[in-house]
Every structure is written in structure tokens, then in C-alpha cells.
Amino acid sequence: MDKTIREIILAVLLSLLGFPARAAGFPLQGFVELDYGIKVSDDDTKRDNYNLLEQRLQLKSAYYFEGNNYLADKGGLINFKGDFTVDEYFGGKTDFELREFYFAWSPYKFLDAKLGRQILTWGTGDYLFINDLFPKDYISFFLGRDDEYLKKPSDALKMSFYPKWGNVDFVASAFTPNTTAEGSRLSFFDPFHGGITAVASNLDLLAPPLQLSNNEYALRYYRNVGSNELALYYFRGFDKNPNSTKSEAEQQLFYRRLDAYGWSLRGPFASGIGNVEFGYYHSRDDSSGKDRLIENSLLKVLGGYEKDLGNDLKVGFQYLYEQRLDYDHYRDNLSPGDFFFDEFRHLLTQRITKLYKNQTVTVSLFNFYSPSDRDGYARPSVSYALSDQWKIALGANLPWGEDDTTEFGQMKRNKNVYFRVRYSF
Amino acid sequence: MKKCAGVFFVLLFWAVPCLAQGLTAQDIVQKANLVSYYAGKDGASDVKMKIIDSQGRERVREFRILRLNSEEGGAQKFYVYFHKPTDVAKMVYMVWKHLGKDDDRWLYLPALDLVKRIAASDKRSSFVGSHFVYEDVSGRSIDADTHELVETTETLYKLKNIPKDSKTPEFSYYFVWIDKNNFMPVKAEYYTADNKLIRTIEALAVAEIEGHPTVTKSMAKDLERGGETTMEFSNIDYDLGLTDEIFAERYLRRAPAEWIKQ
């Protein structure tokens, strides 16, 4: 992009933020893109032909403090990333999402801090998350937006300590729920409608009120043991999905209180990379499992393996085991007419990625398959970097399932084929 | 017995010219390895990479590379911070190079705040889409090939190198020309079993920096499919005092500003 356009965008942006428009010395990067997702299955969402049609402008910039002052001395920096969107799905609605806006500095040699809006990730899974209980956007995921948009930002303070005996991350954040299907764009299983529902859904999602006692805390201890990475996790907060019921009459779902404990190990294994992750989810609002309206405690175990077969061909496999604990209590307390869920879930995933033409062409297939839920989700995609600026992608989202209640089965009417073109500057 | 004597004679015969200078092929390769990949205790450089494909289209990668020798001629750590293109800006690639076992590799994707472990058994795959392979950047183990000094000119040693494991690489043998004066490899040619030249690497410019002979511009050419990549090195420094702690997850997530600034 030529310099003048860049400066105009920057000037507009800075004036929006209330800064005087002085562009010089401020690096500004980003992209513009168009996404178009054509529906290939029928449902009763807002539009019949497509579930994704939007233009996006992402701008990012970073400012490193300089000179002879405390902030420069402590490596202070401000990072900004924001997305302007025009969403044709909602009649050309314009929106701005602030994805990152944080201040980072290292107050001590053994401490890094990051305050503000930020993306947070840890754990070892590939599209599967056990101890990463930071917010995600599953609407973006099922629509086929870039992977970046699977992660939602948190408003948080992250402190990372580096004593001799390991590394400790501590995150305190305000509650941000996952973005999940709610009917206008993606159809899903609505228990109050007894099946897959779209615009007719009338769910009321009750988020915990914004107050100090509803803050979330996440802790990770990790260290290297030779070439292996060992991590321990603790989380205290809320389920990010509205999986529990407050009032059936008023169709109110809420985010139950959740504690999670876990560990993971990742390292070289059988000439590839192996990982194991374990998590115990303690349902604080329903410790005994007797409340039929609140999700029980859960056990989750993940095993994964990735291998480079050479010639830019990589394969990966994962197995996830989930067990609903206190299942007898849950089953014994069900009411007639309740939808009921299985005690065990087995989920397999497979990823295959092949690069061609000096790594400018990426062909990839990611598959979820659950033999116990009899459902799955295929995500094939091809992308081509025509130049350092232009990139196009073509892909599909193909969830399927025999039942309407399972994780992927309930999404089966949202199949799409999407196209994306992006210009980076 | 006769055959053995013959072999002995041949060995003796080709060993003579190098013995005259007190250097075997192994000695030369060892010195060249240290000169080209282990200069100083540590090193840093900005790299501008121009990739030109077979149709003449150009792509540019700009990154800063930090290197720390854990032991001379042995294990090393690399930290590669990308500035350009913008879709990979702030991405970090980290390698703990080992001898005798697979390297450990990590990739940090800033948009996802994700530290990814990369399976890395294939050292002959392209480095960031260029015509250089991983091994060209971090060094091919000198034990991976048998080395033979085939020619000595006034200024250069010419070595023939044959992979011990013939299954892995795409070539059957390669020649390397090494500067007699400073032991810097200046050119390599890769051949298939039927003696077809498929790939070349060349040092286009060498300078003495802080007492170390240093390649400041190099080029890799793919003669089979066409296309070439040039790498230009600038802001080169040695013995900066890099430490192990930089080559860890902490600095993947939070790049050390003092070391990566352009």
C-alpha cells in the first residue's frame, strides 16, 4: 500500500482515538479482506444463501517507549490491534472490535506484566482446549474466518514470573463468554425448542455481572525438562459456554461457576511431537451432580501426536476422552422429557497439511470425529499466497451428525463453502 | 589381501597432498563448520531475504536472527524474529539445535498468542519458503557425510561430500569450495546420482567483521525447478553477551526489544 494511503488511514485512526494526527514514526500494519461463505445446507437462519459476507480492515501498531525514563528502562510498550468490519449478513452493519490494546512492561528482571485487552493462549491441544479456558469465538470458527478469530480477547492483567525453579503465569480477567451459535447466523440445538433451532430461538444468556467477585483467575506453572515441556494449570472462574439452565420457563441459560485443575506434557516422541493433557473440571454450583439443570463436573484427557513426513507434509492426530462425573446422580435426577447426555465421549481428530510451490500453497484437512457421539466436522482448505500482499483462501465447514444434540451434530445445517481474499500492508 | 593393499594405496595417494599441509578433508570440514556457523560465542544479524520464483515473482522476508553456541561445534540455539512480510510480523521461530538427535523447534504466532511445538525431522525442507533449506541456515552435521578432498588450487579446497544415509536428501553428492585462507565455504554444488547439477549455494560477499570472516550476501539457486533466493546480512555483531534465557518461551511471547530492534 502506498505511503499516503497508509498515512491517511493512520490519521483517521489516531483522530478516532483522540490523538493528534501525527503519523511519522508510528508503524502501522494490517490488512483488508473480503469473506464470503455460501451455505450448502438449509436451515431457518436469517439468510438462505450465505452465512458469511463481510469486509474487514485490521490495523495494528506498537509503540515502544524510548529515551531516558522508567517506562523505556523497563521495556514498556503499547500494542494496538483493531478490526473495522462491514457485515453484509446484518444488512451492512458496521462494527469495530478492539482486539488488542495493552501496556506491557518488565518491572523486575524476573517479572513481565501485561495490562489491558489481550489474546491469551496456553495448553497443548490443536483446536481442542482443556486447560486453556480463555474466551473463544465458535461462530467465527464454524463460519471459516481466519484461525486468528477463534480466539477472543480478554480484559486482563497477566503477570509472568521467572524465578529459578520454573515459570509462573498468573492471569486475572473480567469474565468474557465464548461466542456460541444463537440462531440468527448459525442454527444449533435449543433445548427449549426440542431440536435444531435458528431465528425462532429465544434464549436468554445470563452472564455473571461485572463485579470483582466475578473475576476469573488462571494460573500456570511450567518448565522444561530436557526437551520436554511440563505444565500445571489452575483456573477459577466460569464455564465459557452457557451450558447450564437458570430458568426453564424463561429459557434462561447461564455460565456455571467452574474450577479446573490440570497438567500437560509435550515433547519429542517417536520422531515427532507428542503431547498429553489432563483436566478436571469441578462444577462449583453442582458439586454433587444432583442438580439436573447444571452441568456436572468433568474429566478430560487428551493425547496428541504430530509428525513431519518430509517434503512439507505434516500429519497430526489427537484423541480426547471426556467423562461426565457423578453420572448416577445426574441420571437419577433427570425429569421426564429431559434431553439427556452420555457419560462418556470419545473424540478423534486428524490434521494433514501439505505445502506446495515454495510454501505459497497450503492444502489442509482437519477432521473431528466422535465415534461415541456419531458426529464429526471436516474442515478442508486451500490457500495461496499470490504475493507478500495478496492471499486467497478457499475452504469448507462441514459439520455432521446423527443426533441433533451433540457438539457437531447440532451444527449440521450450517455447512458452508467460503472464499477469502486478503491484502496485507 | 591384494584388494586391501589397493585401497590402502589409494587412500595414501589422495591423502598425500593434504598431509603436505597437515590437513585432512575432515580437518578442513571441521574448520569450515566452525567458521561458517560458530563464529564468536554468539552472534546476531538482520537478514533480508529475496525469493524469486521460477516465474520471476519476488517475495521479501526480513528478520533478525540471534544465535548462541552452547558448545563450540556442537549444540546451538537460534531465535528468528520476523519483521516482514506483515502477515508474519512478530512471529518468532526458535530452534535448539542438537547433534545426534532431532532439533527442538518452536513457533510463536502472535495473533493467537500461541507457542507451537514443531515436528522437525525434515531438515531438507525449505526455510520460510525460500530456496535455502533449514540445514543451510543452521548447519548440516559434518557427520552426515563422508568428505573427500578432490582438488586444491592456489586459493581453494574443493571437497566432495557423500551423504552416509542416501535415502534422506534430494541429492547424491555435493562439492564444496572452501577458502584456504580463512576456511569460509564460498560455493556448493549439489548433484543427483546421474551427475546432474540441481542446486547451488554461493557466498556473493564475504567481509571481516569483528575479526570473524562473515558471509554478508549469499544466494541459493534451484536449477531443477528454477528460482533463486538471495540473503543479505546487515547489522552483524558477535559476542553480544546473549544468554540461554533469551531462547525460551518467555521471549517468544515477549520479544527482547534490545536484541531485535531493526
Image: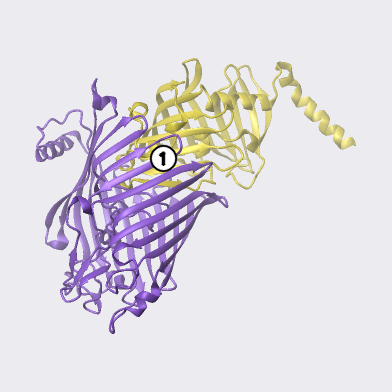
Chain colours: A purple, B yellow
Please give the count of numbered marks on the rendered protein: 1
User: Which quarter of the figure has residue B247?
Assistant: top left
Please name the residue shown 59% across and 28% down the image. Answer: B73
Q: What residue would you read off at disc 1?
A: A167
Residue A154 to residue B256: above or below: below
Residue at the extreme front of the image, as rendered: A288
User: Which quarter of the figure has residue A18?
Assistant: top left
Chain under callout 1: A
Amino acid at dot 1? Asn
Residue at the extreme bottom of the image, as rendered: A336
Q: Is residue A324 visible?
A: yes
- Where is residue B209? Give x, y as percent: 46, 17
- Where is residue A231? Give x, y as percent: 44, 48
Residue A186 to residue A208: above or below: below
Residue at the extreme top of the image, as rendered: B211
Please name the residue shown 21% across and 78% down the image. Answer: A193
Q: Is residue B132 visible?
A: no
Q: Nearer the viewer, residue A178 or A12?
A: A178
- Where is residue B35? Give x, y as percent: 55, 23
Crowd class of label 1 (few under 14; some 14 to 19; many from 20; radius 10 Å): some
Asked if residue B114 lies left or right of residue A138, the reply is: right
